Structures are given as C-alpha cells and as structure tokens.
Amino acid sequence: MLPFSKSESNRVLMLHHLSEKKITYSGLSTCEDVIVLQKILEKKPRKVDVKESGTAMRFLLAYFCITNKNRIITGSARLCNRPVGKLAEALRRLGFRINFVRNENYPPVEVVPVSQQFIKQKTYVDASESSQYISALLLIAPLLPEGMEIELSHEKVSQPYYRLTLDMLKQAGIIYSEFNSFIKVTHQKFKPCEIKIGGDWSAAACWYSMAAIADKAEIKLKGLKADSGQGDKVIAQWLKKFGVETEYMNDGVLIRKRERVSAEPMQIDFTDHPDLAQTMLVTAAANNIRLHCTGIRNLRIKETDRIEAIRTELIKLNARLDVFNENECMLFPDFRLLDNRFKTYNDHRMVLALAPVAVKEKIVIEEPLVVRKSYPEFWNHIQQVIPFG
C-alpha cells in the first residue's frame, strides 16, 4: 500500500481548519511534512517552526493572515534560504501586514493583525517560482470579506498542483470562475463534506523508475486512483517510452516491464512537473537514453539546489549533465557505475530518484532517512523487492 498523497493531505488539513472542521477527511499521510502542518494547526503556537516544509511555510503564511493572528513563522536553515517574498507581496496587496524578520523576501516572517475593513479583493501573484503561492491564496479566498480575484502573472509552474487545490475547493462546495489569467472566488462558506485522500503518485514515481530500469518487472501499487488530480501521475505516460505499461484496477495500478527500451533521445518539459526531474534523469541515465530537459528553473530553490545535486551524483553513473542556461539541460549517459556511494543533500527526492539504481547495481545511499519527509514507509517497502543488509 503506497502512502496517502502528501499534496492532498496538506490541502485537506488546511480546509479542515479553515472550515472550522466542517470538512472531514480519511486517509491522511503520515509523512513528516504533513505531521508538522497538522501539529501547528492544532496547537497554533506563537512562534511557528515548519522545519523543512516549504508547503507549510506558504500555506500557514496565508492562514495566519486570514485568521488575523500575530505569528512568527520560521524553519530550518535551508528553508530560510527559500524565497517567499512573492507570496508575501500578493498578501500585502490584499491589505495584510507581513514583516520579514531578518532578510527581505525570506523567512522568518511575521504576520501582524489588521482591521478587516482594510482587506481588499484584488491581487496578483508571480506564479513563476511556485504554484503553492497560488494554492495558499486560493485556500483562504472564500473567507475574505469580498472574496478574492487573483491575477496570475508570468510563467506558471506546477500548474496541476494549483488545479488540485481548485478541485478540492470544489469538493468543499466552493464556486469559482476563471478567465484568461484570472481566478475569481466570491465570499462564501465551506460546505460540510468528507474528502477521501488517494495514494501518492509522487511516491509511485520511484516504483515506475525501478520497473523502467529493470529488465523485467511486475509491481502492484495499491491506493492509486486513475482519476487523480495529482500532477505526478504523468509518470505513467512518460515511462511508456521505457517499456512500462500501466493497468488501472479498482484498488490501485499494476505496472509491468516486458520489453527492451528504445535508445532514442527524449525531450521533456518539467515546467508542470519539476519534482519528477531527478527521477527521470536517473532513469534515463540507467537506460542510456539521452534526455533534453526544459522547465527546470525553479529546481534550484527546492530542498537543495536540485540541478547541481543531481548533476554531481549522475557523474557516478558515468552520465554528464550539461546545463545550458537557468532553464535547460542535456543528459549524455554511458551507464557504468563509477562510485557506488550517493549523497542525498538532505533532499527526499534525491533518495527516491537514486534508489532505483539498486535494481542494476549494489549501491549505498547516505542519510537515507531524509525520505521520511514524504515517504516514511519507503525503506520497509523497498526491502520487500530488493533485500539489503
């Protein structure tokens, strides 16, 4: 059984508390990111420590604005180097008061209560860094005195994730409208409902990668939904070219690898699916497939600089990653294990991307427990397929 979706869980927790618990849920993820957000929403401490969770930082910044609470939000050293200024500016345009405690645009941030008479309806947000800025605004939109009209400016990244937020708002009875780059949500109440959280397609991507790297494979992934709104479901489509077929079943999916992989070069735009970039690069390297990547700009402001981290580790697979500009790179693989010890850079996605190499070679992954951020059961699950000592 795959873990429940981290993305859905974080959004459901926000809706649960914003609706004063009228919205209930089943199937909450037990990963560290979700546990951190859940504890903060329940206890509402004066000083909020979100640890490594960028999602919690962004969602809670909007939450404490709409609940009009004086809070200081901080996190780990790495999180305090991840920008949040564009979301803060969007909230300030609505009339909320936000102060940066140390460095402008970066956590820690302070939310200061304001009178509701100063809250406006219209704002705009630069959507080129993170779709979570949009999701944070959308989650509180129905509770503003006159609702909210958001203009999305610049290139939009990870669009499936703010669309997931809209889908979950719809389940909660929220009506919205869209026109070009505008989303409008009127002032309205959440309707009582139960939201059932599905399996995590981001976690599933690692198992798809294993199947793609293996000569033959048959893996049942329980809990995944065919109609899921999670963006990383695209992994099933992408890895068809690697010989991985997906059969959708009532309780999940069955994936099979039966045929050899074509060595033809591929091109993938990761603008909407940046979290899959590391996994696809390692999968392509292990299959000796040249991969041209675009849409990678915001990978440098994730849990680590993911472009530099994966470039360094790919060298150990005898694969060269040439970065042409801030948004484009090219993989040149000639698979051969030059070093079997891989670093994870305190990034759970590095674990999920590199572990499938064990299908072909014996490897060592340093700091393996960072994967608990999104997939706490990972090592128990993988040992059922690849025993290790």
Image (cartoon, grey):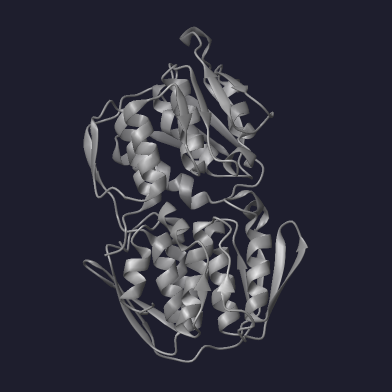
Image spot of residue 166 (x, y percent): 41, 41
Q: From the viewer's perspective, is residue 356 above or below residue 308? A: below
- Report x, y in % for residue 335: 62, 85
Q: If the image is split into quadrants, where does the C terminus sit?
A: bottom left
Q: In this orientation, does residue 291 appear?
A: no
The residue at 36%/51% (across/down) is: 31
Quadrant position of residue 37: top left
Residue extending farthest to the front is 389
Q: Quadrant of residue 321?
A: bottom right
Q: Left or right: 56 with respect to 173?
A: right
Q: Residue at x 67, y 68 (%)?
A: 312
Total labels: the figure holds 0
Q: Residue pushed farthest right?
A: 324
Q: Is residue 320 visible?
A: yes
Q: Is residue 344 above or below residue 280?
A: above
Q: Is residue 49 left or right of residue 387?
A: right
In the displayed structure, 325 sits above or below 8; it is below
In-front residue for pair 245/306: 306
On-image quarter of the N terminus: bottom left
Task: Identify which residue is drawn at 60% across, 84% down.
Answer: 337
Tell me: residue 246, above or below residue 34: below
Residue at x 24%, y 42% (from the top left corner):
25
Q: Position of residue 299 (x, y in %)?
A: 63, 55
